Amino acid sequence: MCSMGNKCGFSLVEVNLAVFVMAMGLLALMVLFPKGLEESELGIADTSEGMFADYILNKLEGNAMAITNWADWVSAVPLAIDGIHDDYMPYVVPFPVGATYTNYINYKLKKEDDGIGRRRYTLEVKSGRYGSFDLNKRTYVTELFYCGM
């Protein structure tokens, strides 16, 4: 209880200490916020890379399953996908096409053919239009077999 003779309230030291504690809490939040945004962008990039690899490899598998004779299998044309190259050179494509948010995908697709009906595709994928391809890339592999009808 305060009376007229006694002074009530906080001292300057107590107020400064409270402001300091609040400042440290807000500073910690401001430091974590950009890291959270960066992790969110990395999550979007990982998802786009996986979706692109799934799209390409499933399309290759679907095209391979439609081949019924050996002459078509040995030619590279039936497994081709519009706009996708298998010469193991880096290419950049927008993905997904037609979406409101377009992420650019850097990719290299390599085809290895053993000559006896097995074909192995190695797809290296990196999200983004610029930067070194060899950093932060993901590798996806599928093997296709000629089953002929």
Image (cartoon, grey):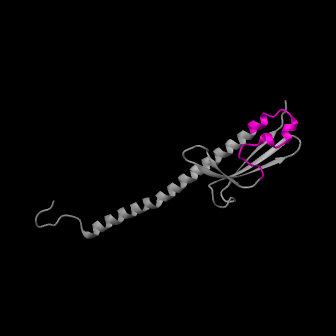
The front one of 82 and 116 is 82
Left or right position of 117 against 82: right
On screen, 53 above or below 8? above
On screen, 25 above or below 75? below
Residue 70 pos. (x, y %): 87, 36
Which residue extends farthest left? 4
Residue 96 pos. (x, y %): 61, 45
Which residue extends farthest top? 149
On screen, 61 above or below 139? above
On screen, 41 above or below 96? below
Which residue extends farthest bottom? 13
Q: Residue at x 23, y 65 (%)?
A: 10
Is residue 73 found inside the magenta-colored segment of the image?
yes
Q: Residue at x 11, y 67 (%)?
A: 5
Q: How many marks?
A: 0
Is residue 129 found inside the magenta-colored segment of the image?
no
Q: Quadrant of the N terminus?
A: bottom left
The front one of 8 and 105 is 105
Q: Quadrant of the C terminus?
A: top right
Q: Residue at x 87, y 37 (%)?
A: 71
The front one of 74 and 146 is 74
Residue 57 pos. (x, y %): 72, 42
Magenta-drawn segment = 61-87
Q: Residue at x 14, y 66 (%)?
A: 6
Residue 18 falls in image quadrant: bottom left
Residue 19 pos. (x, y %): 32, 65
Left or right position of 67 against 54: right
